[in-house]
Image (cartoon, helix red, strand yellow):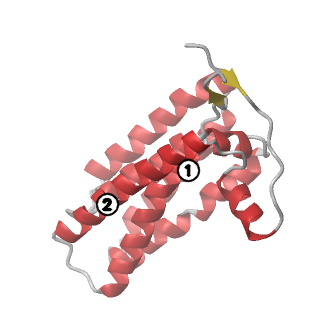
Amino acid sequence: MRAEVDWTIPATPPGWRGSLERFMGPGKSRVELRAEVAGSSVCMALLAWHLFAAPIQAGWPQWVVTVFIGLDLVGGVMTNATNAAKRWYHSKPSRSRLSFVTAHIAYLAAMAFVVLDAAWGWFLLNTALLLAGALLIEMVKLDAKRPAAMGAYMAAVLANLTVVPLPDGLEWFAVLFFLKLLVCYLVPEAPIRSPR
């Protein structure tokens, strides 16, 4: 199958629509948008079903944080996997991508100190795994970025299943969190599309 590669970043409109396009990646095709919306909708519904069926004993602040983070991670995985996002975010310098990843330490803090009731060990280990993985991916040569990301991703997920396991019902967090940031966001890929 032949594919076309298009690195051209289209202009964005002014105002909030342009800001939203620049946040999610300008130039998303209709096919890409439909796949993103369909995948996000199915996975958000499955995650919501899981959260309400899971044996999580928590008050409303914990539920709000868990649901917000879960839905953002699902949407983030789908958005960061698009050609539009790859083209947009990998046209920027490395420090911009590292700033985006570092901002997600707030998610680890919210999970550790709101949902898990001050899980310092979990927070510190996952912060170290996130930052070390991100630095590794950004520093290695281009042809090693995907394998480096997969190695860092597997290490983070396995650490969360063995060294610092999350309570039943929250196992999905590490899987989606590190998938969004280390694999979908940081790995550069050529923005491909079907031939016209």
Residue 129 can be seen in this image? no
- State whether residue 49 is above or below residue 133: below
x and y percentages locating residue 82 in the rendered image: 58, 42
- Find the residue positioned furthest to the front: 196
First along the sequence among labels 2 and 1 = 2
x and y percentages locating residue 70 in the rendered image: 40, 64
The reply, left or right, for residue 173 in relation to residue 149 is: left
- Nearest the eye: 119 or 103: 103
Report which quarter residue 87 is drawn in: top right
Q: Amino acid at mark 2?
A: Ala
x and y percentages locating residue 10 in the rendered image: 80, 44
The reply, left or right, for residue 28 in relation to residue 183 is: right
- Find the residue positioned furthest to the top: 1
- Residue 79: mark: 1
Report helix, strand or loop for mark 1: helix
**Residue found at x 65% / y 54%:** 24
Which residue corresponds to mark 2? 45
Q: Quadrant of the N terminus?
A: top right
- State whether residue 120 is above or below residue 157: below
Q: Amino acid at mark 1?
A: Thr
- Nearest the eye: 177 or 79: 79
x and y percentages locating residue 170 in the rendered image: 28, 62
- Residue 94: mark: none
**Residue found at x 51% / y 27%:** 147
Q: Quadrant of the C terminus?
A: top right
- Find the residue positioned furthest to the bottom: 60
**Residue found at x 79% / y 42%:** 9
Marks 2/1: CA–CA distance: 17 Å
Q: Residues within 10 Å of mark 1 (few under 14, many from 20)?
A: many
